[in-house]
Image (tube, rainbow, N blue to C red):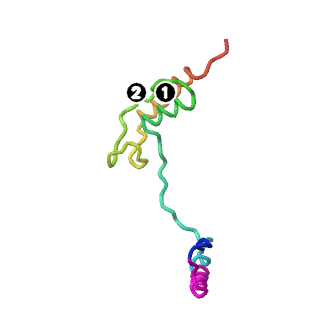
């Protein structure tokens, strides 16, 4: 309710609020299955990929520079419904992973 130093609702107004909460909020049917819609599997765009590699592995190079250009939608290149994973990009992901491991992981002599 309002802070103590502010005007307080009358008792009948409080009761109306309590009745509304009990009749609406407390009667939600949470046990029924609801279809929330489809979920888009999202991939990183080129900039996000480069930044993630840099932040996770501490290697400062641009492995995504060889990736094909990202698709754009509504002027953005990071919308999950727009970004696809064509076979050539998947191959470039594998090549980039090899480059990252060569630069980030030191093999014992």
109 up-or-down from 29: above or below:
above
Give residue 3's position: percent from left, percent from top: 60, 71
**Secondary structure predominantly adopted by residues drawn in magenta:** helix
Give the farthest residue toward the front.
5
Give residue 75's position: percent from left, percent from top: 32, 46
Label 2 near label 1: C-beta < 8 Å?
yes
Quadrant where the C terminus is found in the figure: top right
Would you name the residue on which mark 2 appears? 66
Residue at image location 37% in from the left, 38% down from the top = 70
Mark drawn on residue 69: none
Q: What SS does tag 2 mark?
A: helix
Residue at image location 56% in from the left, 26% down from the top = 58
83 up-or-down from 16: above or below:
above
Q: Determine whether, in the image, residue 33 is placed left or right of residue 38.
A: right
Q: Earlier in the sequence, mark 1 or mark 2?
A: 2
Give the farthest residue toward the left.
75
Tell me the magenta residue range: 7-23
User: How would you rate the neighbour count of disc 1 (Cα within 10 Å): few for under 14, some for 14-19, many for 20 or more?
Assistant: some
Would you name the residue on which mark 1 appears? 96
Q: Is residue 18 magenta?
A: yes
- How many numbered marks appear? 2
Give the farthest residue toward the right.
108
Give the quadrant of residue 14.
Answer: bottom right
Q: What SS does tag 1 mark?
A: helix
């Amino acid at each position: 309710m309002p802070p103590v130093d502010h005007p307080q609702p009358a008792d009948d107004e409080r009761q109306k609020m309590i009745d509304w909460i009990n009749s609406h909020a407390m009667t939600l049917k949470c046990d029924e299955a609801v279809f929330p819609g489809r979920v888009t599997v999202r991939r990183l765009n080129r900039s996000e990929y480069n930044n993630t590699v840099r932040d996770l592995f501490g290697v400062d190079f641009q492995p995504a520079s060889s990736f094909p250009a990202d698709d754009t939608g509504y002027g953005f290149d990071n919308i999950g419904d727009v970004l696809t994973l064509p076979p050539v990009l998947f191959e470039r992901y594998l090549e980039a992973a090899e480059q990252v491991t060569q630069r980030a992981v030191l093999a014992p002599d």
